[in-house]
Image: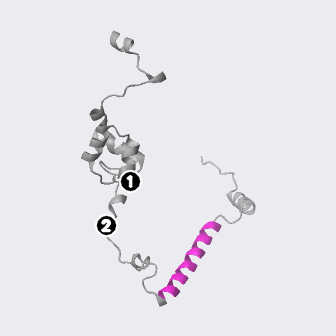
Amino acid sequence: MSAVNAFNWKAFTDESHAKEGDPFKSMKRGAEISRRTTECVAKIRETKPSHGTVAGITDKPLEPRAPDMMRGGARPNAGRKLPKIDERRAMHLLSEGLTKKEIADRFDIPYKTMLTLFKNMGAAKVRGEYDWTGKYAKDVSKSKAT
């Protein structure tokens, strides 16, 4: 025994086209835009043959590799590279008592970058623990009891 398909697909399709319009409208529009763009590029290439190619982006000579600051990605040691500074001098200034903000100003780099550099260099070990004051002061009696 065979099942009978009682749904009228022709009527449904005609009805949906009447409500929503042509389902291929956006595809046809994209094809028209692509055709016009291709025509315009062809006209421009008559005067400048390199237009629309990698060489046509700029008249400057292209560098095949990315600049150092822009390399990176989701791999170990990837991401934007930190600026080159004299780490030894920075650590010396930190041990002399200058704040990280002052050191960042001296090296003319952003403060957040300076924090990252110090974190990577292990600056907390050089300066030692901070003496907490105010409401954040560590309770010495509790820490010694344990």
Mark 2 surroundings within 10 Å by alpha-carbon count, few (fewer than 14), some (14 through 19), many (20 or more): few
Q: Nearer the viewer, residue 44 or 32?
A: 44
- Specify start and end residues of the magenta stretch as a single range: 24-45
Q: Sequence order check: which comes first, mark 2 or mark 1?
A: 2
Find the residue positioned furthest to the left.
88
Residue depicted at x 51% and y 86% = 44
Q: Secondary structure at mark 1?
A: loop
Asked if 48 appears above or below 99 in the picture, the reply is below
Is 26 part of what is drawn in magenta? Answer: yes
Residue depicted at x 52% and y 80% = 38
Residue 142 point in image, percent of width and height: 38, 12
The residue that disc 1 covers is 108
For residue 48, the mark is none
Find the residue positioned furthest to the top.
145
Mark 1 surroundings within 10 Å by alpha-carbon count, few (fewer than 14), some (14 through 19), many (20 or more): few
Identify the amino acid type marked 1: Asp
Q: Nearer the viewer, residue 119 or 56?
A: 119
Is 101 part of what is drawn in magenta? Answer: no
Q: CA distance from mark 2 to mark 1?
A: 27 Å
Asked if 71 appears above or below 30 in the picture, the reply is above
Residue 20 point in image, percent of width and height: 72, 60
Residue 23 point in image, percent of width and height: 65, 64
Q: Nearer the viewer, residue 53 or 110?
A: 110
Q: For residue 71, what is the image quadrant?
A: bottom left
Residue depicted at x 44% and y 76% = 57
Residue depicted at x 27% and y 50% = 86
Asked if 103 appears above or below 11 in the picture, the reply is above
Q: Nearer the viewer, residue 44 or 128?
A: 128
- Residue 146 in view, yes or no: no
For residue 65, the mark is 2
Residue 102 point in image, percent of width and height: 39, 45
Identify the amino acid type marked 2: Arg
